[in-house]
Image (cartoon, rainbow, N blue to C red):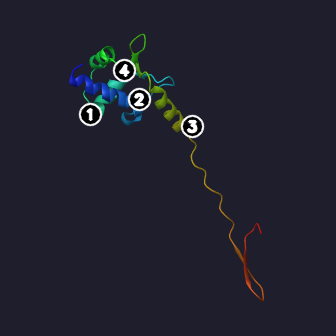
Amino acid sequence: MNKRLTRISKYMSFILCHEPKSIGLKLDTDGWANVDEFVEKANASGKSVTTEQVMTVVAENDKQRFELSEDKSKIRAVQISRKAIRQQTRQAAAKPATPKPKKPAAKTIFTRSKIVQRTETD
């Protein structure tokens, strides 16, 4: 691979393995992304990538990091896509933090010998 394709391969690894959300790309539950959507969002984020370059990277990558679906419309990173899927799943399943219950206000009780503060639960 030439230097340009090597840079594209590294970029694809970064996006498909670690940070699909950085360009607004969503992976399905098996880690697949639409090739045309990947190219579109990569170009929108400032990278110059074509579908042909993506196909060439997949075909020429000696480490076989990427795979295409049978109809060549979807792509995923082979080994690390599970990590990105877990991360997306965790973020989607994370519940918003519930506020802690407020402590009841302390009541001041005046007695002749001392001042005592008690809460509602005392």
Image quadrant in which you'd find residue 15: top left
Give the Cα distance between marks 3 and 4.
Answer: 26 Å
- Note whether 1 is above or below 23 in the view shown: above
Q: Do the residues labelled 1 and 4 touch (CB within 8 Å)?
A: no
Give the Cα distance between marks 3 and 2.
Answer: 20 Å
Residue at figure coordinates x 41%, y 10% from the top left: 71
**Residue 74, disc:** none
Residue at figure coordinates x 42%, y 14% from the top left: 69
The residue indicated by pointer 1 is 46
Q: Which amino acid does label 4 sit on?
A: Val
Residue at figure coordinates x 36%, y 25% from the top left: 38
Q: Are marks 3 and 2 in contact (CB under 8 Å)?
A: no
Mark 2 or mark 1: whose residue is earlier in sequence: 2
Q: Where is residue 73 in the image (x, y as percent from the top left)?
A: 39, 15
The residue indicated by pointer 3 is 93
Q: Where is residue 43 in the image (x, y as percent from the top left)?
A: 28, 29
Q: What residue type is labelled 1?
A: Gly
Considering the image in quadrants, where does the N terminus appear?
Answer: top left
Query: Which of pointers 4 and 2 indicates the residue nearer the eye?
Result: 2
